[in-house]
Every structure is written in C-alpha cells, then in structure tokens.
Amino acid sequence: MSLLKVENLTKSYRTFNSLFSHLSHPALQNVSFQLEKGESVGLIGENGSGKSTLARIISGIEKADSGHVWLNGTDIYQRKNRRQQISVVFQDYFSSVNPTMTVLQAICEPLLEQKQAAAKSLEPLVVQFLKKVNLSTDCLHKYIYQLSGGQAQRVCLCRALINNPSLIILDEALSSLDIVTQVQLLELLIELKNEFQLSYFFISHNIQMICYLCERVLFFKQGQIITQSDIENLAEIKSDYAQKLIRSVI
Ligand SMILES: Nc1ncnc2c1ncn2[C@@H]1O[C@H](COP(=O)(O)OP(=O)(O)O)[C@@H](O)[C@H]1O
Ligand SMILES: [Mg+2]
C-alpha cells in the first residue's frame, strides 16, 4: 500500500472581476500521484502553477473541490490521520509559527494539541530534538522573532518532527535562506530522513536540491502534472517544459 495516494484533485479559486460577477480560476486539475513509504518525491513548476495549493490540500489545511488524499489507505480529512503522520514546513517560517512564542512553546504546540501535557514536562524531549537539528539548547527560551532565518527554519523542522510523522511536506522551505544555510539544512534533511525513515514531498524551484534529496520528480504546470521522472533518468526526459525547468538552474 502506498504511503500517500493523491487521486484526481481539483481545486478552483473564485476571483471577483466586478461587484456582481466572478471568474473561476482552476488551480489544480485532476492531479493524481502516489508516494511509497520511505520514498521522497520532488515537485517543480513555474510560479503560480498550484504547488502550494497542492501542499495545503495534502496536509489537510485546505479542502479540494473534488478528489481524494489517502495516507496509508485512510482518508486524510479524518483529522486524527493527518495530525500524526503528515507535517508541513513552509517557506515563510513566520506564518508557520507564531513569532511571539518561545522555541519551547513553538515546538511543543503540535504535541499539546493532542495530549494534555504541560510544555515544561516536554522540555527533555524538545532538547533532544534541538540537538538533532543542531540548535543550541540556549535557544529554548528565546522568542522565535529573535532567531535568524536558518534557526527559525530548524525550529519549524523540530516542530514537524516531534509528532513522529511518516511524511513531511516541504514547500519551498529552504528558498528564503542564504546558500550556506540551504546546504546545511539540505544535509540535515538527508540525516533526518535516514534516522526517522521519513518520506519528503519536496517542493522547490531548484532541481539540484530535488536531485540531492529525492528519488523522483514531478513537473507541474497550470495545476497539472505534465510529466515525471526518476532522478537517475532525468537526462532522458522528453518534455520541453521539463527541460526548460531543468536548464533554468543548472
Ligand atoms: N487563497 C487563494 N485565493 C485565490 N486564489 C488563490 C489562492 N491561493 C492560490 N491562488 C491562486 O491559485 C494559483 C496557484 O497558486 P499557488 O498554489 O500559490 O502556486 P505556486 O505555489 O505554484 O506558486 C495562482 O493563480 C494563485 O493566484
Ligand atoms: Mg508556492
């Protein structure tokens, strides 16, 4: 059974073009794919092609107009399935975590939603996770807004990991960081993937990063998967659009 099965997802947004009329703009059109346990899949596509919409729907933040998302064979919209097994990290860390929380509070928040526990009692666990993402325990009582971008994104990763998920969705999660921090976090993602037997759904406009982290890549255009390829066969890809995206960074 696949870890993630996405079936015929369709989503449109209404945009008002005058007071009395609106246009329906399709963001996703019949998107289907599967991701096996332990496999990591990249998603690349031009701006506005619907990548973040897909990420929000798979993580259960937003509902599709039609279609299904199955995680280990169960429907994602049953809240308990989603909470424990999928985590998501976005590009803009200040929209993922409340900047006025402390690091301890931010990392504990997903656990506190499930369990009746005090943040204080979870401190030893949080310290363990801080070590895993190479953050000093001095950070524990700092506020999120006091951290650098790279540190804040490491906190978001801790938050994503603490529920022991089987899938982490990373939506341009490294894009706003400087290149040195990007490389450090990419290496960290590989270590975490091996240690926790994680799968990633890695959305990026950087094919090199996708090649480093994933076994397969989906090419996305106007809300549709145009083509896909195993990383090792990328040189043989036929689609002009895919070739253009690959060439744009190499
Ligand atoms: N909440 C929303 N309301 C209206 N339109 C939206 C909303 N979110 C996304 N869109 C539109 O859907 C399309 C896909 O957006 P998005 O998923 O953010 O693309 P990407 O992440 O690939 O850049 C865009 O045209 C965008 O303007
Ligand atoms: Mg996006």
Image (cartoon, rainbow, N blue to C red):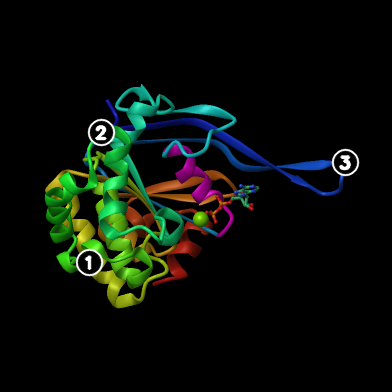
The prevailing secondary structure element of the residues shown in magenta is helix
Q: Is residue 209 left or right of residue 49?
A: left
Element at badge 1? helix
Q: Earlier in the sequence, mark 3 or mark 1?
A: 3
Distance from Cα at disc 2 to Cα at disc 1: 24 Å
Element at badge 3? loop
Residue drawn at 33 percent across, 37 percent down: 113
Element at badge 2? loop
Q: Mark 1 = which residue?
A: 139
Residue drawn at 31 percent across, 69 percent down: 150
Label annotation for residue 116: 2
The magenta-colored residue range is 47-58
On screen, residue 157 above or below 79: below
Distance from Cα at disc 3 to Cα at disc 1: 52 Å
Residue 30 visible from this viewpoint: yes
Give the total number of marks visible in the rendering. Answer: 3
Residue drawn at 25 percent across, 33 percent down: 116
Q: Nearer the viewer, residue 90 or 198?
A: 90
The part of the image, by quadrant, that contains residue 127 is: bottom left
Where does the image place residue 243, in percent across and percent down from the top left?
A: 47, 61
Q: Mark 3 = which residue?
A: 20
Q: Is residue 240 left or right of residue 127?
A: right
